[in-house]
Amino acid sequence: MIGLYILNSNPKNKINTLFFIITICLVANNILIILIYQEADKTAAEMINRIGTSLLIIIFTLLIFLSVYISNIFSLYNIRRLQNIFFGLLLLLQTYLIYRNFTIPVFMNMIRYNDKWKVINIPDQSQVLLVGCYWFILSFFYVLIIVLWKIKSKSRREKKQASILLVSFFLPGFFLVSYFVFFFNFFKFTKDAVTGEGTLIFFIWILGIGYCILKYRFLSITPEYISGELISNIDELVILITPDRKVITMNERAKELIGDKTVSDITDFSKIIPEYESIGHKVNKLFEGRENSFNCRISYPGNNQKMYMNARFSAVKDRFNDILGILIIAKENKELKHLKISYNLTERQMDIITMVLSGLSNKELAGKLLISERTVENHLVNIYNKLGINNKIELYNMLQEYENEKFTYYRGSAP
């Protein structure tokens, strides 16, 4: 049920899919345990044992894949190029062990005793040792990955999740490995060993995941799901950006203004903000947690003329005060449109006014418009003459008085 719940919350997410596959493998393994107790034929019981062991090999491999995707450990430590190599080696080892599992002549000698199959000896000790070592090494890697994630992560929520994942896996996981490696190989407790019972311990790990889901919304309610439901019918432009600068959602109004692009088409959100060059440092402060929000002006091409918008950039935080992303909400500034008509301002002059209000200096304006600084000054003089003002400070004041609602600008230097 937990696996289905997680998969249903976000079927396209590879982490959710992996977790679902692991739960299916665990359920299948425990079905095999039931079958082996009911099976009276020795050959069939041995085949069920081979399949169960192979499933456990797959489960451990998937567990490492899941831990890597959850923690994003290779990216956290700037070794992303090694991730596929690591996965390739794991799959190669897994394939080899499963191949040996089905090709060795006798897997385990078992006898039926008190309606249970018991192992009396293991002809090929090397296979059990190899499989046991594989489980032990992957258990070590799982713990190492989660510990490194906990150390590196700046999120308090993620640190708590890592702690629970460690506790819920460490004891049952290592007990299971010890059960097979030490009992079967070193202490020779094969006389009383009962096949399959150790796999039941792994459900403690599933319970740990369940606790994370209930307590910290782990793997369940996703930003994509929440944001999609909240903003789908909002008239204003709405864009939600993750801390790694990716757009995870935007509403229909945003798609219309940006040019009917989908989220997957946008690899760098700065490309969809025309004035990003002048506000980029403010955006960085939001991601760093040094500011909570700021306002600015942005513009988008309309059908016949540019549309000028009041935009608010706000940091979105969880209850642990960790940054989840940035929410951008922008509404058309009709007052600027009226200003343009009332004072007969050109599109170029309106562009310059918007950039000036965004805090750009004359030199920065010249670089952005690919004109000389002298030409910028001439444009500003013409704007001042049309508006009946003398400098940028008066321009700010005029716009604030002109608008019905007060708007805070990020101000640059004035001449």
Image: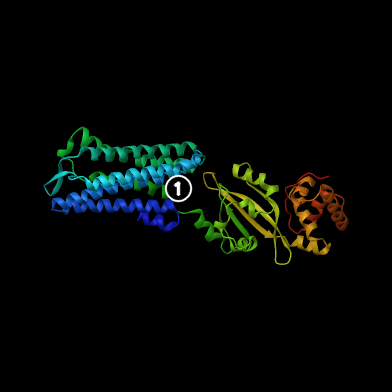
Residue lying farthest bottom?
A: 304
**Residue in front for this viewpoint, 189 or 260:** 260
User: Is residue 38 toward the left or the right of residue 17 in the image?
Assistant: left
Question: Which residue, given by chain and number where applicable, does mark 1 sit on?
Answer: 216
For residue 267, above or below residue 341: above
At x 42% / y 53%, what residue is drawn? 16
Write down the quadrant of residue 167 in the picture: top left
Question: Residue, x 39% and y 51% (percent of image)?
Answer: 18
**Is residue 319 toward the left or the right of residue 395 in the image?**
left
In the image, residue 39 sits, relative to residue 291, either above or below, namely below
* As drawn, 57 above or below 345: above
Q: Number of numbered discs present?
A: 1
- Give percent across and percent down for residue 289: 60, 42
Q: How is the image coloured?
A: rainbow
355 displayed left or right of 273: right
- Which kind of residue does numbered mark 1 sit on? Tyr
Q: Position of residue 388 (x, y in %)?
A: 88, 56
Q: Is residue 291 visible?
A: no
Most distant residue in the top direction: 186
Residue 236 versus residue 100: which sits nearer the camera?
100
Q: Is residue 306 in sight in this rendering?
A: yes
Residue 93 found in image quarter: top left
Mark 1 neighbour class, 10 Å CA radius: few under 14, some 14 to 19, many 20 or more:
some
| Callout 1 secondary element | helix
Residue 15: image location, x then y, percent: 43, 50
| x, y percent for residue 226 | 51, 57
Image height check: is 9 above or below 367?
below
Q: Split into 4 quadrants, where in the image is the N terminus? A: bottom left
Q: Which quadrant holds the C terminus? A: top right
Q: Nearer the viewer, residue 125 or 39?
A: 125
